[in-house]
Image (tube, helix red, strand yellow):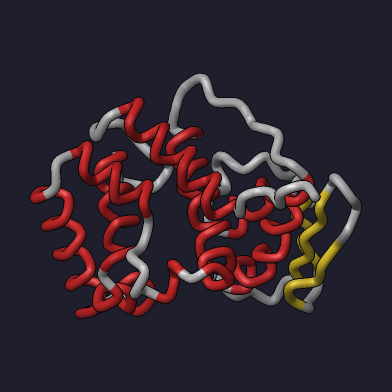
């Protein structure tokens, strides 16, 4: 019986850690204002400091606390240790380390941030992901697309590798965003400048 493939959350986490180790802490990313060190600190705090999690969503005083924790983590942790913590992920007592939860919340997160580092390089090119990975990312597109700013326009997303479409929001006229699932996911997460999609 063949072994099942490693979860996307693990393969993308490992690939991201490898790239961070190769590039160092001072390289740009697609996250405005963040270097690779900032991105690594964000992931370490996300994995290891549940008390700082609300700030990433709620902003305000919670956001300021999250920023302080990230800044302290970045300044107090050596680069090799920061990368090692990104690579190992959350400790076993944090629910996001548990198999099904890890796959649900970390697969798309690690993939998006891997692309944040890749696509900030001048020589980047799209990469081919296996169909199973694209399917997993497609499952997350709807959630992220619904978080985009509201408007009266309808919103539909379409994956160009299979032709499958999904209506995110009713309205008229309808904006259709088409591309491979990874590209649509990047668009849905606010990375329009680097997402290879067609908007019509």
Q: In the image, 130: left or right of 82?
A: right
| Residue shown at the point (76%, 56%) measured from the top left | 135
Please indicate, yes or no, whether residue 66 appears anywhere in the rendered image: yes
Residue placed most toward the observer, 81 or 151: 81
User: Where is residue 18 drawn, in percent x and y?
Assistant: 41, 33
Where is 80 relative to 139, above or below?
above
| Residue shown at the point (29%, 44%) measured from the top left | 84
**Residue 36, picture quadrant:** top left
**Residue 47, picture quadrant:** bottom left
User: As drawn, which residue projects farthest toward the right?
Assistant: 163
User: As drawn, which residue projects farthest toward the left?
Assistant: 76
**Residue 37, picture quadrant:** top left
Please indicate, yes or no, whether residue 133 appears anywhere in the rendered image: no
User: Where is residue 74 drawn, in percent x and y?
Assistant: 17, 50
User: Where is residue 169 drawn, in percent x and y?
Assistant: 74, 76
| Residue shown at the point (50%, 57%) measured from the top left | 109
Where is 40 relative to 102, above or below?
above
User: As drawn, which residue projects farthest toward the front?
Assistant: 1
| Residue shown at the point (63%, 67%) measured from the top left | 145
User: Where is residue 142 drawn, in percent x and y?
Assistant: 69, 69
Q: In the image, 116: left or right of 37?
A: right
């Amino acid at each position: 019986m063949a072994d099942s493939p490693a979860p996307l959350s693990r393969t993308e986490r490992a690939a991201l850690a490898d790239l961070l180790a190769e590039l160092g802490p001072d390289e740009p990313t697609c996250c405005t204002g963040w270097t690779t060190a900032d991105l690594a600190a964000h992931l370490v705090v996300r994995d290891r400091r549940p008390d700082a999690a609300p700030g990433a969503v709620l902003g305000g005083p919670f956001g300021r606390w999250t920023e302080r924790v990230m800044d302290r983590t970045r300044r107090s942790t050596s680069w090799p240790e920061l990368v090692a913590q990104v690579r190992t992920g959350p400790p076993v007592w944090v629910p996001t380390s548990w198999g099904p939860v890890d796959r649900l919340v970390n697969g798309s997160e690690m993939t998006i941030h891997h692309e944040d580092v890749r696509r900030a390089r001048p020589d980047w090119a799209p990469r081919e992901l296996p169909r199973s990975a694209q399917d997993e990312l497609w499952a997350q597109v709807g959630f992220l697309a619904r978080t985009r700013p509201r408007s009266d326009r309808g919103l539909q997303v379409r994956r160009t590798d299979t032709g499958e479409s999904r209506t995110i929001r009713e309205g008229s006229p309808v904006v259709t965003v088409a591309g491979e699932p990874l590209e649509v996911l990047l668009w849905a997460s606010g990375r329009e400048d680097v997402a290879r999609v067609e908007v019509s």
